[in-house]
Image (tube, helix red, strand yellow):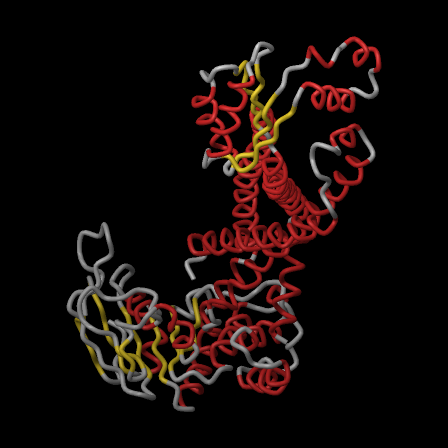
Amino acid sequence: MTKTYPKASRPSLDNVSVSIEKGEFVFFIGPSGSGKSTIIKMLLHEVTPNKGRVVVNGKDVTSMRSWKRPHFRRSIGCVFQDFRLLPNRTAYENVAFALEVIGKTKAVARRVVPEVLELVGLGGKEHRYPHELSGGEQQRVAVARAFVNRPLILLADEPTGNLDPDTSIEIMRLLDRINRTGTTVVMVTHDSNIVNQMRRRVIEIESGRIVRDQARGVYG
Amino acid sequence: MRMKYVLSEVLVGLWRNVTMTIAMIITLAVSLFMLGGSGLLYQKVGDMKDLYYENVEVSIFLTQEVTEQQRTDLDGKLKNDPMVKEVLYVDKQQAYERFQQMYADAPDLVNAVKPDQLPESFRLKLNNPEQYKNIYDQYKESEGVDEIVDQSKLLDKVFGVLSGFQNGALAIAIVMAIAALLLVANTIQVAAYSKRREVAVMKLVGASNWFIQAPFVLEAVVAGLLGSILGLVALSVLKVTAASSSMAALEGLISPVSWGEIFLVYPLMAGVGAVVSAATAWVTLRFYLRV
């Protein structure tokens, strides 16, 4: 597929073709502006390609009407560099909010949220506010929120970008554990350390083209 | 649970920016008050037109020197005229009696006038009161006719003034409505901005569009309904004070507005207030949230 943003001199993604299997763990690496984030946005149906198709979970996202987007998003979890937590809600409430706004009852939240917070290693810190948590812990809350709905795919856009190396490794262990439950994990990063340690599939993008696609790859 | 969430969001939203909310509600109230007022006036003018024009008469006054022959000719022509519904001949004596009745509270005037001084006349009721002009043209030059007077001319002036009021009220309603809409749009923008993080998360995890928009739209609807209630209160206050003040002097001319009519016009005010606010909020969100 190809994506050219309006006013851009060259395509953000140029004739890129990638296939990711269910249950895979994939790194997208490359310098800033190479088009990695555009891939994430396409998977979320935030942007559509000018040419080509995006198929997620067997559904053609390219032709999807925008009113179907909310329902589609429920099958995808998202984690970002800046966590995107609600500052006036506790860890528990942040995760529960994600459930409640898609129509789950409070009873469901009471059952599921402590479980997933336990899974990400935040047992006992449910009632702390984001500013009372470390960066790593905040990212765990974000992962919990992304995973609580048991999505088929977890998208992570530089999830360790704001974290120190040790904390980053912990987050990666967490993502690895989630991947082992059968969830496909797609992660955009330029943290070479992590990519080298994980030894997973690496797709390198440069100037909108795929320059490398390697199973059990390393950074650069 | 979701309904409870939405409703509490609405209250929080209205309270968060309470000065703006009050400004919005007051402008909505003034606008809807004017709308309701012009609606009532429209109804009244309609009623009054039916009533007055039903009874309106065209009077053909005859000259003092009119001959028997001229009078009979005219009577015959009028009776056969398809525009004329009813003809009543009023002779000098009857004219004097009418005069006495009309000015019963001014005996000096009555005493000063002799039956002889009053002109004889034909009083016509027309099938269509607006055809007065045709009658005038047709009979103006007839022998023995002095003057043709149409009461509806006077009524036209009265109704002209009333519909002037009505148009004025409507114009104010529209101008205030524009101000109210801008305030609604602004309030919704502020509300959306202060909830931008929540909205971003909701979009991310796949909350449905209506669920994201509902609190904002309902916020505008609640403001619209509160505005219409205030407008209704203003109309009621106007009715009560008008009935007991100088307006009461107009009682005979303008039929009084009943409570029933005020409450009948309320659904119009509430409906316009709610629907227009909701539409404004929705359009604002389309531009502002892109959901």
Q: Quadrant of residue A4?
A: bottom left
Check the image and report above or below for A216 versus B132. Answer: below
Considering every residue shown, the one lying at the far bottom of the view is: A181
Between B30 and A117, which is closer to the camera in this rendering? B30
Considering every residue shown, the one lying at the far left of the view is: A15
Give the residue drawn at x 24%, y 75%: A203
Residue A114 appears at what percent x and percent y? 61, 84
Left/right of residue B162 with respect to residue B249 in the rendered view = left
Asked whether residue B23 is in view, the answer is: no
Q: Quadrant of residue B153?
A: top right
Check the image and report above or below for B73 versus B206. Answer: above
Which part of the image, by quadrant, shows the C terminus of chain B?
bottom left
Between B243 and B121, which is closer to the camera in this rendering? B121
Residue B155 appears at what percent x and percent y? 60, 28
Check the image and report above or below for A191 versus B167. Answer: below
Circle count: 0
Left/right of residue A179 with respect to residue A129 in the rendered view = left
Residue B157 appears at what percent x and percent y? 58, 25
Asked whether residue B254 is in view, the answer is: yes
Between B10 and B246, which is closer to the camera in this rendering? B246
Left/right of residue A198 with respect to residue A120 in the rendered view = left
Residue B213 appears at what percent x and percent y? 51, 62
Give the residue drawn at x 15%, y 69%: A15
Which part of the image, by quadrant, shows the N terminus of chain B?
bottom right
Between A105 and B185, which is closer to the camera in this rendering? B185
Give the residue drawn at x 53%, y 51%: B276
